Amino acid sequence: MLPPAIRQAAAWSVAVILLIAVASLLVFALVELRAATVPFVLALLGASLLYPVVPWMVRRGVGRSLAAGLTCVVLVAAVGGVIALLVNSLVHSAPQIATSLQQAGQRIADWLGPFGAKIQHALGNAKGETNSLVSALTSGVLSGLGLLTQLLTGGVLALALVFFFLRDGHRTGDAIRSYLPGRTAETVVACAERAFDAMAGFMRGTTLIALIDATFITVGLVALGVPGAPGLGALVFIGAYIPFVGAFLSGTVAVLVALADGGLGTAVWALGVVLAVQMIEGNILQPLIQSRTVELHPATIMVAVVAGSGVAGILGALLAVPLCAAGVGVISVLRGVPGPRAVRRSGDGVDGTS
């Protein structure tokens, strides 16, 4: 009794609703099982960053298991060293940064006049609630220990998965072909390769860009005499892994600290340093360093970051972009778009999927 257009629209609506329902259930399952899924994704990212090292060592006569083990040892040493440096820098710089931010707030309130006085009054009223919150957090030491145990367990699981991915990743294609028929298996293998290449491109490019950004901004802040420059550089390095949002927040903190310590002139120079580094990153470093496998529109990246933060907080914001890039890579394979691996595939017989 309904026109064909209405019936077609109804069919499409049912298909979209079913797709959204399945996707929602999948996301819910992944979030509920985050104790296993988060280490798995982190291990994939770590393996994508380090995978070229294993074939390089194998070609020089090192056994694959030993190569994977040595790579994991270097990974633990590097991550431990970076975390120690960042924590040490932030711990020593945190009092200076906190004091400078308070002074910056006072300067801004003075400039705003009566409106600034209202802001100060509101912040003063919030101090009591803040102290209550600190007390509540202090009383929850056991919860913090439980969280630390979960982090250690997840870290050990992620490290073990990185070892197995590095050691046995070259067998993934054969394993898939042994379980699936020919054409389906080749499609699944191609999707896995493209997703892995996308995550590898994101991790390698973002790590190098974060290091360059943090180095130049730290040098600029040290030259301006801004207190806590190493800590601010550490914030820049960490924030670089969250596109747009991380750079904005870390740059804002640096400018506020410069404003409080050196006045408006120093703040303007610090803003110039941050903007110059960000412009160089956006116009030179990103096109030059970032792999072509990560081809996401800026709007897509912003939506992914917001959605990831809404689902899993800071960790979701960190993982949203590489997972989105992997998903786009899979879609491109299903659409029949050739990937870079098909062009640059070498004859060394090493497969990069994991």
Image (cartoon, rainbow, N blue to C red):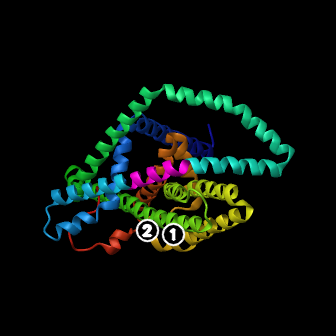
Q: Which residue is mark 2?
A: 291
All told, the count of numbered labels is: 2
Within the image, what quadrant is residue 273 found in?
Answer: bottom right
Which SS class for mark 2? loop
| Residue at left offset 34%, top offset 39% | 152
Task: Give whichever of discs 2 and 1 has the lower sequence position.
Answer: 1
- Tell us which disc is closer to us: 2 or 1: 1
Q: Are the residues tagged 2 and 1 within 8 Å (C-beta)?
A: no
| Residue at left offset 42%, top offset 66% | 337
Percent from the top left, x then y, of residue 81? 36, 55
Percent from the top left, x then y, of residue 234? 50, 56
Residue 141, placed above or below residue 348 = above
Which SS class for mark 1? helix
Residue 270, placed above or below residue 132 = below
Q: Which residue is mark 1?
A: 286
Residue 62 visible here: yes
Residue 239, placed above or below residue 290 = above
Q: Is residue 86 magenta?
A: yes
Left or right: residue 271 compared with residue 305: right
Residue range corresponding to the magenta coloring:
82-94
Residue 32, placed above or below residue 82 = above
Q: Is residue 310 magenta?
A: no
Label 2: few (<14), some (14–19) or many (≥20) C-alpha neighbours in 10 Å: many
